[in-house]
Image (cartoon, helix red, strand yellow):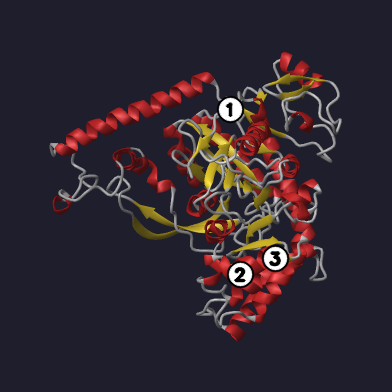
Amino acid sequence: MRPEPGGCCCRRPLRANGCVANGQVRNGYVRSSAAAAAAAAGQVHHVTQNGGLYKKPFNEAFEETPMLVAVLTYVGYGVLTLFGYLRDFLRYWRIEKCHYATEREEQKDFVPLYQDFENFYTRNLYMRIRDNWNRPICSVPGARMDIMERQSHDYNWSFRYTGNTIKGVINMGSYNYLGFARNTGSCQEAAAKVLEEYGVGVCSTRQEIGNLDKHEELEKLVASFLGVEAAMAYGMGFATNSMNIPALVSKGCLILSDELNHASLVLGARLSGATIRVFKHNNMQSLEKLLKDAIVCGQPRTRRPWKKILILVEGIYSMEGSIVRLPEVIALKKKYKAYLYLDEAHSIGALGPAGRGVVDYFGLDPEDVDVMMGTFTKSFGASGGYIGGKKELIDYLRTHSHSAVYATSLSPPVVQQIITSMKCIMGKDGTTLGKECVQQLAENTRYFRRRLKEMGFIIYGNEDSPVVPLMLYMPAKIGAFGREMLKRNIGVVVVGFPATPIIESRARFCLSAAHTKEILDTALKEIDEVGDLLQLKYSRHRLVPLLDRPFDETTYEETED
Protein backbone atom coordinates (compact mmCIF):
# COMPACT_ATOMS: atom_id res chain seq x y z
CA MET A 1 0.00 0.00 0.00
CA ARG A 2 1.26 3.51 -0.84
CA PRO A 3 1.70 6.48 1.50
CA GLU A 4 -0.13 9.77 1.16
CA PRO A 5 0.76 11.40 -2.15
CA GLY A 6 1.25 14.78 -0.54
CA GLY A 7 4.49 13.71 1.10
CA CYS A 8 6.04 12.29 -2.05
CA CYS A 9 6.95 15.43 -3.95
CA CYS A 10 8.96 17.20 -1.28
CA ARG A 11 10.57 16.70 2.09
CA ARG A 12 8.04 18.84 3.97
CA PRO A 13 5.30 16.97 5.84
CA LEU A 14 2.59 19.26 4.48
CA ARG A 15 1.94 20.30 0.90
CA ALA A 16 -0.10 23.20 -0.42
CA ASN A 17 -2.81 20.89 -1.77
CA GLY A 18 -3.61 19.89 1.80
CA CYS A 19 -3.90 16.17 1.06
CA VAL A 20 -1.75 15.29 4.10
CA ALA A 21 -3.38 16.06 7.37
CA ASN A 22 -2.02 13.92 10.17
CA GLY A 23 0.92 11.57 9.90
CA GLN A 24 4.59 11.00 10.53
CA VAL A 25 7.57 11.43 8.23
CA ARG A 26 9.89 8.56 7.36
CA ASN A 27 12.64 8.99 4.76
CA GLY A 28 10.90 12.13 3.56
CA TYR A 29 7.54 10.44 3.04
CA VAL A 30 4.37 10.83 5.03
CA ARG A 31 2.87 7.77 6.60
CA SER A 32 -0.55 8.02 8.17
CA SER A 33 -0.99 7.31 11.86
CA ALA A 34 -3.07 4.26 10.92
CA ALA A 35 -0.16 2.92 8.90
CA ALA A 36 2.19 3.62 11.80
CA ALA A 37 -0.04 1.69 14.16
CA ALA A 38 -0.15 -1.22 11.73
CA ALA A 39 3.63 -1.16 11.49
CA ALA A 40 3.92 -1.28 15.27
CA ALA A 41 1.72 -4.35 15.23
CA GLY A 42 4.13 -6.09 12.84
CA GLN A 43 2.17 -5.34 9.67
CA VAL A 44 3.57 -2.54 7.51
CA HIS A 45 1.07 -1.17 5.00
CA HIS A 46 1.39 1.57 2.43
CA VAL A 47 -1.87 3.52 2.22
CA THR A 48 -2.81 6.21 -0.24
CA GLN A 49 -5.90 8.09 0.80
CA ASN A 50 -8.14 9.99 -1.62
CA GLY A 51 -6.14 13.20 -1.71
CA GLY A 52 -5.56 16.01 -4.16
CA LEU A 53 -3.55 13.93 -6.63
CA TYR A 54 -5.22 10.50 -6.45
CA LYS A 55 -8.90 9.86 -7.04
CA LYS A 56 -8.76 6.34 -5.54
CA PRO A 57 -6.48 4.22 -3.33
CA PHE A 58 -3.18 3.27 -4.94
CA ASN A 59 -2.15 -0.09 -3.47
CA GLU A 60 1.36 -1.25 -4.19
CA ALA A 61 3.78 -3.13 -1.94
CA PHE A 62 7.09 -4.94 -2.05
CA GLU A 63 7.79 -7.42 0.70
CA GLU A 64 11.32 -7.35 2.04
CA THR A 65 13.57 -10.32 1.26
CA PRO A 66 13.97 -12.47 4.39
CA MET A 67 17.53 -12.26 5.66
CA LEU A 68 18.07 -16.03 5.66
CA VAL A 69 16.82 -16.30 2.08
CA ALA A 70 19.15 -13.51 0.96
CA VAL A 71 22.14 -15.17 2.66
CA LEU A 72 21.34 -18.59 1.17
CA THR A 73 20.91 -17.01 -2.28
CA TYR A 74 24.37 -15.45 -2.10
CA VAL A 75 25.78 -18.76 -0.83
CA GLY A 76 24.11 -20.56 -3.76
CA TYR A 77 25.71 -18.23 -6.29
CA GLY A 78 29.02 -18.58 -4.45
CA VAL A 79 28.91 -22.38 -4.67
CA LEU A 80 28.00 -22.25 -8.37
CA THR A 81 30.85 -19.83 -9.01
CA LEU A 82 33.38 -22.03 -7.20
CA PHE A 83 32.28 -25.11 -9.13
CA GLY A 84 32.39 -23.05 -12.31
CA TYR A 85 36.05 -22.17 -11.77
CA LEU A 86 36.75 -25.81 -10.90
CA ARG A 87 35.12 -26.97 -14.14
CA ASP A 88 37.07 -24.36 -16.13
CA PHE A 89 40.24 -25.74 -14.57
CA LEU A 90 39.24 -29.30 -15.51
CA ARG A 91 38.37 -28.19 -19.06
CA TYR A 92 41.75 -26.51 -19.42
CA TRP A 93 43.55 -29.74 -18.56
CA ARG A 94 41.15 -31.83 -20.70
CA ILE A 95 39.83 -33.71 -17.68
CA GLU A 96 36.27 -32.42 -18.12
CA LYS A 97 34.48 -34.62 -20.69
CA CYS A 98 32.18 -31.87 -21.98
CA HIS A 99 34.26 -29.52 -24.16
CA TYR A 100 31.44 -27.45 -25.60
CA ALA A 101 32.33 -24.58 -23.23
CA THR A 102 35.93 -24.33 -24.46
CA GLU A 103 37.16 -22.28 -27.41
CA ARG A 104 38.01 -24.06 -30.62
CA GLU A 105 41.69 -24.25 -31.51
CA GLU A 106 41.30 -21.90 -34.48
CA GLN A 107 39.85 -19.22 -32.17
CA LYS A 108 42.64 -19.26 -29.61
CA ASP A 109 44.49 -16.25 -31.04
CA PHE A 110 41.38 -14.09 -31.51
CA VAL A 111 40.41 -11.32 -29.08
CA PRO A 112 37.44 -12.57 -26.98
CA LEU A 113 34.08 -11.20 -28.13
CA TYR A 114 32.66 -11.14 -24.60
CA GLN A 115 33.83 -9.89 -21.24
CA ASP A 116 35.40 -12.55 -19.07
CA PHE A 117 32.64 -12.68 -16.42
CA GLU A 118 29.84 -12.71 -19.01
CA ASN A 119 31.50 -15.67 -20.66
CA PHE A 120 31.97 -17.38 -17.32
CA TYR A 121 28.35 -16.78 -16.28
CA THR A 122 27.02 -18.14 -19.59
CA ARG A 123 29.20 -21.27 -19.48
CA ASN A 124 28.71 -22.27 -15.89
CA LEU A 125 25.44 -20.82 -14.61
CA TYR A 126 23.11 -19.95 -17.48
CA MET A 127 23.73 -23.18 -19.41
CA ARG A 128 22.54 -25.26 -16.46
CA ILE A 129 19.02 -23.83 -16.80
CA ARG A 130 18.97 -22.78 -20.46
CA ASP A 131 16.19 -25.27 -21.23
CA ASN A 132 13.72 -22.91 -19.51
CA TRP A 133 13.98 -20.34 -22.31
CA ASN A 134 13.39 -20.19 -26.07
CA ARG A 135 10.89 -23.03 -25.96
CA PRO A 136 9.27 -23.14 -29.42
CA ILE A 137 5.48 -23.05 -29.47
CA CYS A 138 3.48 -24.32 -32.44
CA SER A 139 0.03 -22.78 -31.90
CA VAL A 140 -1.73 -19.51 -31.21
CA PRO A 141 -0.41 -18.04 -27.91
CA GLY A 142 -3.87 -17.92 -26.34
CA ALA A 143 -5.01 -19.10 -22.92
CA ARG A 144 -3.60 -22.52 -23.87
CA MET A 145 -0.84 -23.35 -26.33
CA ASP A 146 1.15 -26.26 -27.78
CA ILE A 147 4.90 -26.58 -27.16
CA MET A 148 7.38 -28.61 -29.20
CA GLU A 149 9.17 -31.16 -27.03
CA ARG A 150 12.98 -31.07 -27.09
CA GLN A 151 15.87 -32.80 -25.37
CA SER A 152 19.54 -32.04 -24.78
CA HIS A 153 22.37 -34.57 -24.48
CA ASP A 154 25.19 -32.05 -24.03
CA TYR A 155 24.17 -30.10 -20.92
CA ASN A 156 21.87 -27.64 -22.77
CA TRP A 157 24.48 -26.52 -25.32
CA SER A 158 22.25 -27.82 -28.10
CA PHE A 159 18.74 -29.28 -28.36
CA ARG A 160 17.15 -32.03 -30.42
CA TYR A 161 13.44 -32.07 -31.17
CA THR A 162 11.71 -35.35 -30.38
CA GLY A 163 8.84 -34.83 -32.83
CA ASN A 164 6.29 -34.82 -30.02
CA THR A 165 4.09 -31.89 -29.03
CA ILE A 166 2.98 -30.99 -25.51
CA LYS A 167 -0.69 -30.14 -26.02
CA GLY A 168 -2.91 -27.73 -24.11
CA VAL A 169 -0.26 -26.04 -21.98
CA ILE A 170 -1.76 -23.22 -19.89
CA ASN A 171 -0.10 -20.03 -21.09
CA MET A 172 0.88 -17.82 -18.13
CA GLY A 173 3.69 -15.98 -19.89
CA SER A 174 2.40 -14.19 -23.03
CA TYR A 175 1.50 -10.49 -23.06
CA ASN A 176 -1.91 -11.36 -24.51
CA TYR A 177 -3.65 -9.12 -21.98
CA LEU A 178 -7.03 -8.75 -23.72
CA GLY A 179 -7.01 -12.09 -25.52
CA PHE A 180 -6.86 -10.69 -29.08
CA ALA A 181 -4.00 -13.05 -30.06
CA ARG A 182 -6.23 -15.71 -31.58
CA ASN A 183 -6.94 -17.31 -34.96
CA THR A 184 -10.72 -16.98 -34.91
CA GLY A 185 -13.17 -14.11 -34.57
CA SER A 186 -13.58 -10.65 -36.07
CA CYS A 187 -9.88 -9.70 -35.91
CA GLN A 188 -8.76 -12.78 -37.82
CA GLU A 189 -11.51 -12.38 -40.41
CA ALA A 190 -10.72 -8.71 -41.02
CA ALA A 191 -6.97 -9.38 -41.25
CA ALA A 192 -7.55 -12.26 -43.70
CA LYS A 193 -9.68 -10.01 -45.91
CA VAL A 194 -7.02 -7.28 -45.98
CA LEU A 195 -4.32 -9.89 -46.64
CA GLU A 196 -6.23 -11.00 -49.72
CA GLU A 197 -6.64 -7.40 -50.93
CA TYR A 198 -3.28 -5.80 -50.03
CA GLY A 199 -0.90 -8.74 -49.62
CA VAL A 200 1.66 -9.13 -46.83
CA GLY A 201 4.45 -6.62 -47.37
CA VAL A 202 4.61 -2.97 -48.46
CA CYS A 203 8.28 -2.99 -49.58
CA SER A 204 8.75 0.72 -49.04
CA THR A 205 8.93 3.42 -46.39
CA ARG A 206 6.04 5.71 -45.50
CA GLN A 207 7.76 8.70 -47.13
CA GLU A 208 8.22 6.96 -50.45
CA ILE A 209 5.50 4.67 -51.77
CA GLY A 210 4.56 2.73 -48.65
CA ASN A 211 1.93 5.03 -47.16
CA LEU A 212 -1.37 3.14 -47.40
CA ASP A 213 -4.86 4.35 -46.62
CA LYS A 214 -4.87 1.75 -43.83
CA HIS A 215 -1.91 3.49 -42.17
CA GLU A 216 -3.75 6.82 -42.24
CA GLU A 217 -6.87 5.19 -40.80
CA LEU A 218 -4.85 3.55 -38.03
CA GLU A 219 -3.14 6.79 -36.96
CA LYS A 220 -6.43 8.71 -36.80
CA LEU A 221 -7.93 5.90 -34.72
CA VAL A 222 -4.93 5.81 -32.33
CA ALA A 223 -5.14 9.59 -31.81
CA SER A 224 -8.85 9.29 -31.04
CA PHE A 225 -8.26 6.35 -28.68
CA LEU A 226 -5.55 8.22 -26.75
CA GLY A 227 -7.36 11.57 -26.73
CA VAL A 228 -4.49 13.44 -28.41
CA GLU A 229 -4.23 15.64 -31.50
CA ALA A 230 -2.20 13.25 -33.67
CA ALA A 231 -0.34 9.95 -33.66
CA MET A 232 2.17 8.04 -35.76
CA ALA A 233 2.59 4.27 -36.07
CA TYR A 234 5.90 2.40 -36.36
CA GLY A 235 6.76 -1.13 -37.41
CA MET A 236 8.64 -2.11 -34.24
CA GLY A 237 7.94 -1.32 -30.61
CA PHE A 238 11.58 -1.39 -29.51
CA ALA A 239 12.60 1.00 -32.30
CA THR A 240 9.75 3.35 -31.40
CA ASN A 241 11.69 4.20 -28.24
CA SER A 242 15.28 3.73 -29.36
CA MET A 243 14.92 5.74 -32.59
CA ASN A 244 12.55 8.52 -31.46
CA ILE A 245 14.24 9.65 -28.24
CA PRO A 246 17.38 10.72 -30.16
CA ALA A 247 15.11 12.84 -32.38
CA LEU A 248 13.69 14.65 -29.34
CA VAL A 249 16.81 15.37 -27.25
CA SER A 250 20.50 15.79 -27.96
CA LYS A 251 23.69 17.18 -26.44
CA GLY A 252 22.92 19.93 -23.95
CA CYS A 253 19.68 18.25 -22.86
CA LEU A 254 19.06 16.26 -19.68
CA ILE A 255 17.23 12.93 -19.42
CA LEU A 256 15.90 11.80 -16.05
CA SER A 257 15.27 8.06 -16.32
CA ASP A 258 13.72 5.59 -13.89
CA GLU A 259 16.32 3.01 -12.85
CA LEU A 260 14.09 0.14 -14.02
CA ASN A 261 13.21 1.51 -17.46
CA HIS A 262 13.13 -0.90 -20.39
CA ALA A 263 16.25 -1.49 -22.50
CA SER A 264 14.67 0.34 -25.46
CA LEU A 265 14.37 3.53 -23.38
CA VAL A 266 17.92 3.12 -22.09
CA LEU A 267 19.29 2.60 -25.60
CA GLY A 268 17.37 5.58 -26.98
CA ALA A 269 18.66 7.79 -24.18
CA ARG A 270 22.26 6.71 -24.79
CA LEU A 271 22.00 7.21 -28.55
CA SER A 272 20.68 10.74 -28.07
CA GLY A 273 23.96 12.11 -26.67
CA ALA A 274 22.08 13.84 -23.85
CA THR A 275 23.22 13.70 -20.25
CA ILE A 276 21.45 10.86 -18.40
CA ARG A 277 20.70 10.83 -14.70
CA VAL A 278 18.87 7.94 -13.07
CA PHE A 279 16.36 8.24 -10.23
CA LYS A 280 15.25 5.53 -7.83
CA HIS A 281 12.37 3.42 -9.10
CA ASN A 282 9.03 5.21 -8.74
CA ASN A 283 10.60 7.41 -6.05
CA MET A 284 9.29 10.96 -6.32
CA GLN A 285 11.71 12.26 -3.71
CA SER A 286 14.64 11.07 -5.81
CA LEU A 287 13.13 12.52 -8.99
CA GLU A 288 12.46 15.90 -7.40
CA LYS A 289 16.00 16.12 -6.05
CA LEU A 290 17.38 15.58 -9.56
CA LEU A 291 14.99 18.18 -10.96
CA LYS A 292 16.02 20.71 -8.31
CA ASP A 293 19.71 20.07 -8.94
CA ALA A 294 19.18 20.40 -12.69
CA ILE A 295 17.47 23.77 -12.31
CA VAL A 296 19.90 25.14 -9.72
CA CYS A 297 23.20 23.83 -11.09
CA GLY A 298 22.56 23.65 -14.83
CA GLN A 299 24.99 21.87 -17.12
CA PRO A 300 28.32 20.56 -15.79
CA ARG A 301 31.25 22.98 -15.96
CA THR A 302 29.47 25.74 -17.95
CA ARG A 303 26.46 26.00 -15.56
CA ARG A 304 24.31 27.01 -18.48
CA PRO A 305 20.61 26.03 -18.28
CA TRP A 306 19.69 22.71 -19.85
CA LYS A 307 18.11 23.03 -23.31
CA LYS A 308 15.44 20.49 -22.31
CA ILE A 309 14.74 18.24 -19.35
CA LEU A 310 12.96 15.01 -20.35
CA ILE A 311 11.53 12.57 -17.80
CA LEU A 312 11.34 8.94 -19.01
CA VAL A 313 8.90 6.59 -17.24
CA GLU A 314 6.83 3.48 -18.04
CA GLY A 315 3.15 2.87 -17.34
CA ILE A 316 3.64 -0.67 -16.02
CA TYR A 317 7.16 -1.90 -15.28
CA SER A 318 7.36 -5.34 -16.81
CA MET A 319 9.67 -6.95 -14.24
CA GLU A 320 8.32 -5.35 -11.06
CA GLY A 321 4.60 -5.28 -11.83
CA SER A 322 4.52 -1.73 -10.48
CA ILE A 323 2.51 1.17 -11.92
CA VAL A 324 4.08 4.59 -12.36
CA ARG A 325 2.97 7.23 -9.85
CA LEU A 326 1.80 9.37 -12.75
CA PRO A 327 -0.16 12.07 -10.87
CA GLU A 328 2.97 12.94 -8.89
CA VAL A 329 5.25 12.76 -11.94
CA ILE A 330 2.97 15.18 -13.77
CA ALA A 331 2.88 17.49 -10.74
CA LEU A 332 6.69 17.57 -10.65
CA LYS A 333 6.91 17.99 -14.42
CA LYS A 334 4.66 21.06 -14.27
CA LYS A 335 6.42 22.48 -11.23
CA TYR A 336 9.87 22.34 -12.81
CA LYS A 337 8.82 22.93 -16.45
CA ALA A 338 10.14 19.60 -17.72
CA TYR A 339 8.85 17.34 -20.49
CA LEU A 340 7.35 13.89 -19.89
CA TYR A 341 7.83 10.79 -22.08
CA LEU A 342 5.47 7.96 -21.06
CA ASP A 343 6.03 4.40 -22.32
CA GLU A 344 2.71 2.55 -22.19
CA ALA A 345 3.86 -0.70 -23.77
CA HIS A 346 2.31 -2.85 -21.03
CA SER A 347 -0.37 -0.48 -19.72
CA ILE A 348 -2.23 0.49 -22.90
CA GLY A 349 -5.31 -1.70 -23.15
CA ALA A 350 -4.55 -3.34 -19.80
CA LEU A 351 -5.34 -0.46 -17.42
CA GLY A 352 -8.16 2.01 -16.98
CA PRO A 353 -11.96 1.67 -17.13
CA ALA A 354 -11.86 2.14 -20.91
CA GLY A 355 -8.55 0.31 -21.43
CA ARG A 356 -6.78 3.52 -22.45
CA GLY A 357 -3.77 3.01 -20.25
CA VAL A 358 -2.31 4.54 -17.13
CA VAL A 359 -3.62 8.04 -17.97
CA ASP A 360 -7.14 6.61 -18.05
CA TYR A 361 -6.42 4.57 -14.89
CA PHE A 362 -5.69 7.73 -12.88
CA GLY A 363 -8.34 9.83 -14.64
CA LEU A 364 -5.79 12.36 -15.91
CA ASP A 365 -5.73 14.67 -18.93
CA PRO A 366 -3.74 13.21 -21.88
CA GLU A 367 -2.51 16.72 -22.67
CA ASP A 368 -0.42 16.64 -19.48
CA VAL A 369 1.79 13.96 -21.06
CA ASP A 370 4.01 15.46 -23.75
CA VAL A 371 4.95 12.21 -25.51
CA MET A 372 2.66 9.17 -25.26
CA MET A 373 4.35 6.04 -26.52
CA GLY A 374 2.94 2.52 -26.64
CA THR A 375 3.09 -0.75 -28.54
CA PHE A 376 0.59 -2.88 -30.44
CA THR A 377 2.41 -6.09 -29.52
CA LYS A 378 0.57 -6.86 -26.30
CA SER A 379 -3.04 -5.85 -25.71
CA PHE A 380 -3.77 -5.63 -29.46
CA GLY A 381 -2.23 -8.98 -30.43
CA ALA A 382 -0.19 -7.48 -33.29
CA SER A 383 3.20 -5.78 -33.74
CA GLY A 384 4.64 -2.28 -33.91
CA GLY A 385 4.37 0.84 -31.79
CA TYR A 386 3.05 4.40 -31.80
CA ILE A 387 3.81 7.93 -30.61
CA GLY A 388 0.94 10.26 -29.72
CA GLY A 389 0.85 13.92 -28.77
CA LYS A 390 0.55 17.42 -30.22
CA LYS A 391 0.30 17.73 -34.01
CA GLU A 392 3.54 19.75 -34.05
CA LEU A 393 5.34 16.89 -32.32
CA ILE A 394 4.09 14.26 -34.77
CA ASP A 395 4.85 16.43 -37.81
CA TYR A 396 8.39 16.90 -36.47
CA LEU A 397 8.90 13.16 -35.93
CA ARG A 398 7.67 12.31 -39.44
CA THR A 399 10.71 14.08 -40.88
CA HIS A 400 13.32 13.68 -38.12
CA SER A 401 12.77 10.16 -36.70
CA HIS A 402 15.01 7.45 -38.16
CA SER A 403 12.28 4.92 -37.45
CA ALA A 404 9.86 6.94 -39.58
CA VAL A 405 12.17 7.89 -42.44
CA TYR A 406 14.11 4.66 -43.00
CA ALA A 407 11.91 1.81 -41.72
CA THR A 408 9.55 -0.22 -43.89
CA SER A 409 5.84 0.42 -43.33
CA LEU A 410 3.65 -1.79 -41.18
CA SER A 411 2.23 -4.88 -42.91
CA PRO A 412 -1.42 -4.30 -43.98
CA PRO A 413 -2.86 -7.40 -42.22
CA VAL A 414 -1.09 -6.32 -39.01
CA VAL A 415 -2.56 -2.83 -39.37
CA GLN A 416 -6.03 -4.30 -39.77
CA GLN A 417 -5.56 -6.49 -36.69
CA ILE A 418 -4.76 -3.34 -34.67
CA ILE A 419 -7.68 -1.36 -36.14
CA THR A 420 -10.21 -4.12 -35.47
CA SER A 421 -9.04 -4.83 -31.92
CA MET A 422 -8.85 -1.12 -31.05
CA LYS A 423 -12.35 -0.49 -32.39
CA CYS A 424 -13.51 -3.44 -30.31
CA ILE A 425 -11.99 -1.90 -27.14
CA MET A 426 -13.59 1.46 -27.98
CA GLY A 427 -16.97 -0.13 -28.64
CA LYS A 428 -17.01 1.08 -32.24
CA ASP A 429 -17.73 -2.43 -33.48
CA GLY A 430 -21.24 -2.22 -32.04
CA THR A 431 -20.54 -4.74 -29.25
CA THR A 432 -19.47 -4.62 -25.61
CA LEU A 433 -16.83 -7.32 -26.10
CA GLY A 434 -13.90 -4.95 -25.66
CA LYS A 435 -15.25 -3.48 -22.44
CA GLU A 436 -15.94 -6.96 -21.11
CA CYS A 437 -12.35 -8.02 -21.89
CA VAL A 438 -10.95 -5.01 -19.99
CA GLN A 439 -13.17 -5.81 -16.99
CA GLN A 440 -12.32 -9.52 -17.13
CA LEU A 441 -8.60 -8.77 -17.12
CA ALA A 442 -9.00 -6.55 -14.05
CA GLU A 443 -10.97 -9.27 -12.23
CA ASN A 444 -8.46 -11.97 -13.16
CA THR A 445 -5.58 -9.78 -11.98
CA ARG A 446 -7.00 -9.08 -8.55
CA TYR A 447 -8.14 -12.68 -8.03
CA PHE A 448 -4.80 -14.21 -9.06
CA ARG A 449 -2.75 -11.80 -6.96
CA ARG A 450 -4.96 -12.27 -3.90
CA ARG A 451 -4.78 -16.08 -4.07
CA LEU A 452 -0.99 -16.12 -4.44
CA LYS A 453 -0.59 -13.84 -1.42
CA GLU A 454 -2.93 -16.05 0.62
CA MET A 455 -0.76 -19.06 -0.24
CA GLY A 456 2.27 -17.34 1.26
CA PHE A 457 4.27 -16.33 -1.83
CA ILE A 458 6.11 -13.02 -2.02
CA ILE A 459 4.44 -11.06 -4.83
CA TYR A 460 5.70 -7.73 -6.17
CA GLY A 461 3.82 -4.84 -7.71
CA ASN A 462 0.49 -3.08 -7.83
CA GLU A 463 -2.74 -4.94 -7.13
CA ASP A 464 -4.13 -3.78 -10.51
CA SER A 465 -1.09 -4.78 -12.57
CA PRO A 466 -1.57 -7.86 -14.83
CA VAL A 467 2.20 -8.46 -14.57
CA VAL A 468 2.67 -10.62 -11.46
CA PRO A 469 6.25 -11.37 -10.30
CA LEU A 470 6.55 -14.32 -7.87
CA MET A 471 9.90 -14.25 -6.08
CA LEU A 472 12.14 -17.32 -6.35
CA TYR A 473 15.47 -15.82 -5.16
CA MET A 474 17.77 -18.86 -5.23
CA PRO A 475 19.49 -19.75 -8.53
CA ALA A 476 18.69 -23.47 -8.35
CA LYS A 477 14.99 -22.72 -7.98
CA ILE A 478 14.85 -20.73 -11.23
CA GLY A 479 15.29 -23.83 -13.36
CA ALA A 480 13.43 -26.12 -10.99
CA PHE A 481 10.31 -23.94 -10.97
CA GLY A 482 10.14 -23.66 -14.77
CA ARG A 483 10.64 -27.41 -15.25
CA GLU A 484 8.16 -28.46 -12.56
CA MET A 485 5.49 -26.15 -13.95
CA LEU A 486 5.95 -27.51 -17.47
CA LYS A 487 5.64 -31.07 -16.11
CA ARG A 488 2.22 -29.96 -14.83
CA ASN A 489 1.30 -28.52 -18.27
CA ILE A 490 1.76 -24.88 -17.35
CA GLY A 491 4.08 -22.59 -19.29
CA VAL A 492 5.72 -19.82 -17.24
CA VAL A 493 8.51 -17.29 -17.67
CA VAL A 494 11.36 -17.41 -15.15
CA VAL A 495 13.83 -14.55 -14.89
CA GLY A 496 17.23 -14.23 -13.23
CA PHE A 497 20.43 -12.21 -13.29
CA PRO A 498 21.32 -10.07 -15.27
CA ALA A 499 17.68 -9.23 -16.10
CA THR A 500 17.04 -8.83 -12.36
CA PRO A 501 19.26 -8.06 -9.35
CA ILE A 502 21.31 -11.13 -8.47
CA ILE A 503 19.25 -12.03 -5.36
CA GLU A 504 15.83 -11.20 -6.84
CA SER A 505 15.21 -13.99 -9.34
CA ARG A 506 11.54 -14.50 -10.04
CA ALA A 507 8.82 -16.12 -12.08
CA ARG A 508 6.70 -13.63 -14.01
CA PHE A 509 3.05 -14.39 -14.71
CA CYS A 510 1.07 -12.34 -17.23
CA LEU A 511 -2.69 -12.45 -16.85
CA SER A 512 -5.10 -12.39 -19.78
CA ALA A 513 -8.79 -11.78 -20.29
CA ALA A 514 -8.76 -15.12 -22.13
CA HIS A 515 -8.05 -16.93 -18.84
CA THR A 516 -11.19 -18.40 -17.34
CA LYS A 517 -11.59 -18.91 -13.61
CA GLU A 518 -11.19 -22.65 -14.13
CA ILE A 519 -7.86 -22.12 -15.90
CA LEU A 520 -6.63 -19.79 -13.16
CA ASP A 521 -7.73 -22.21 -10.42
CA THR A 522 -5.88 -25.05 -12.17
CA ALA A 523 -2.74 -22.93 -12.46
CA LEU A 524 -3.01 -21.78 -8.82
CA LYS A 525 -3.40 -25.37 -7.61
CA GLU A 526 -0.22 -26.43 -9.42
CA ILE A 527 1.69 -23.32 -8.31
CA ASP A 528 0.69 -24.11 -4.72
CA GLU A 529 2.02 -27.67 -5.06
CA VAL A 530 5.30 -26.55 -6.66
CA GLY A 531 5.64 -23.85 -4.00
CA ASP A 532 5.47 -26.49 -1.29
CA LEU A 533 7.80 -28.81 -3.19
CA LEU A 534 10.48 -26.14 -3.69
CA GLN A 535 9.77 -24.29 -0.43
CA LEU A 536 9.00 -20.99 -2.14
CA LYS A 537 6.48 -19.63 0.37
CA TYR A 538 8.76 -17.04 1.95
CA SER A 539 6.14 -14.45 2.85
CA ARG A 540 5.82 -13.21 6.40
CA HIS A 541 3.03 -10.86 5.29
CA ARG A 542 5.14 -7.88 6.29
CA LEU A 543 4.70 -5.54 3.35
CA VAL A 544 7.48 -2.99 2.98
CA PRO A 545 6.54 -0.34 0.41
CA LEU A 546 9.01 0.71 -2.22
CA LEU A 547 8.96 4.31 -1.07
CA ASP A 548 9.75 3.32 2.51
CA ARG A 549 13.05 1.81 1.44
CA PRO A 550 16.08 3.88 2.53
CA PHE A 551 16.92 6.69 0.12
CA ASP A 552 20.60 7.61 0.00
CA GLU A 553 20.33 10.36 -2.64
CA THR A 554 22.67 8.41 -4.92
CA THR A 555 22.34 9.26 -8.62
CA TYR A 556 24.08 7.93 -11.68
CA GLU A 557 25.26 10.14 -14.52
CA GLU A 558 26.09 8.34 -17.75
CA THR A 559 26.97 11.11 -20.20
CA GLU A 560 28.86 14.29 -19.47
CA ASP A 561 28.76 17.24 -21.89
In front here: 549 or 76? Answer: 549
Up-down relation of residue 298 to residue 491 (above or below): above
Q: Which residue is identified by label 1?
A: 553
Side of 30 relative to 460 (left or right): right
**Residue lying at 23% horizontally and 30% vertically, measured from the top left:** 86
Residue placed furthest toward the top: 40
Name the residue carrying label 3.
Answer: 392
**Mark 2 falls on what kind of element?**
helix
Image point (56%, 65%), residue name: 401
Q: Nearer the viewer, mark 3 or mark 2?
A: 3
Q: Nearer the viewer, mark 1 or mark 3?
A: 3
Crowding around mark 1 (Cα neighbors within 10 Å: few <14, some 14 to 19, many 20+) is: few
Q: Residues within 10 Å of mark 2 (few under 14, many from 20)?
A: some
> Can residue 190 be seen in the rendering of this structure?
no
Dot 1 or dot 3, earlier in sequence? 3
User: In the figure, residue 83 lies in which quadrant?
Assistant: top left
The quarter of the displayed image where residue 257 is located: top right
Q: Is residue 312 depicted above or below 137 in this figure? A: above
Q: Position of residue 63 (x, y in %)?
A: 62, 27
Residue on which the image places disc 2: 398
Q: Is residue 511 above or below residue 185?
A: above
Q: Amino acid at mark 1?
A: Glu
